[in-house]
Amino acid sequence: MPSDVKNVFEGWETGDAAKDALLTDVSHRINATDAAIVAADPESEALRFYYKGEALAGAATWVKGYVDEGRSITGTVRFYDPDLVMVDKDTAALAYCADESKASDMDRKTGKADKTPVTRDSYVAYNSRLEKGEDGVWRTAVLESERGNAKCVR
């Protein structure tokens, strides 16, 4: 990703190797999504690698929206408060928060960033279902988000 796009993952290490591997795969999925937006590539191989099913369709649509609008992203997003529940050895649920107050969309042609005020909507709660593939990679199968969720507002 370009130097003006950065994701920070706070508290994403548990000390448990299996859980930390899952959280690492999720952080790679988040970075892959941002890289696809920056590259204007809704068909990104990385998206297909880290997402599956409903979540893959949603991610491709999300990235395509940026492409269709001539938009990209810039700034830093902080991800925090991961709450991981292992359902079984191949399925997990992960909830986490994102602080987008230091990030913004930008016009792809001009490179000009939107100046938006920080509001409750700058904070996003995510809930996801993850499934471990035969290759050992955790893929996001379901991803839901809610802007302004009180749990995440700081």
Image (cartoon, helix red, strand yellow):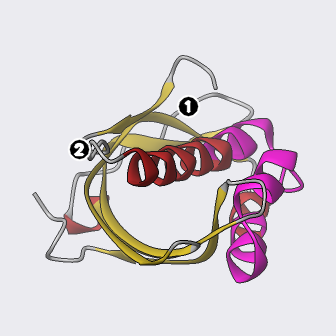
Q: Say the numbered circle drawn on residue 112.
A: 1
| Mark 2: amino acid | Gly
Q: Earlier in the sequence, mark 2 or mark 1?
A: 2
Tell me the quarter of the image containing the C terminus.
Answer: bottom left
From this view, report whether residue 9 is shown above or below residue 90. above
Q: Is residue 31 left or right of residue 40?
A: left
Total residue callouts: 2
Q: Nearer the viewer, residue 129 or 154?
A: 129
Residue drawn at point x = 23 percent, y = 44 percent: 11
Residue under numbered circle 2: 11
Could you give the CA–CA distance between mark 2 and mark 1, rounded to whole angstroms? 32 Å
**Bounds of the magenta segment:** 34-60
Query: Magenta segment: does it hold 30?
Result: no
- Front position among marks 2 and 1: 2
List x then y, in percent, for residue 43. 89, 55
* Residue 73 marker: none
Q: Examine the residues drawn in magenta and state their main secondary structure.
A: helix
Residue 37 forms part of the magenta stretch:
yes
Q: Image quadrant for the N terminus?
A: top right
Q: Position of residue 31 (x, y in %)?
A: 58, 41
| Element type at mark 1 | loop
Residue shown at the point (15%, 73%) measured from the top left? 151
* Horizontal arrangement in the rendering, residue 52 relative to residue 6 (left or right): right
Give the x, y percent position of residue 44.
85, 48
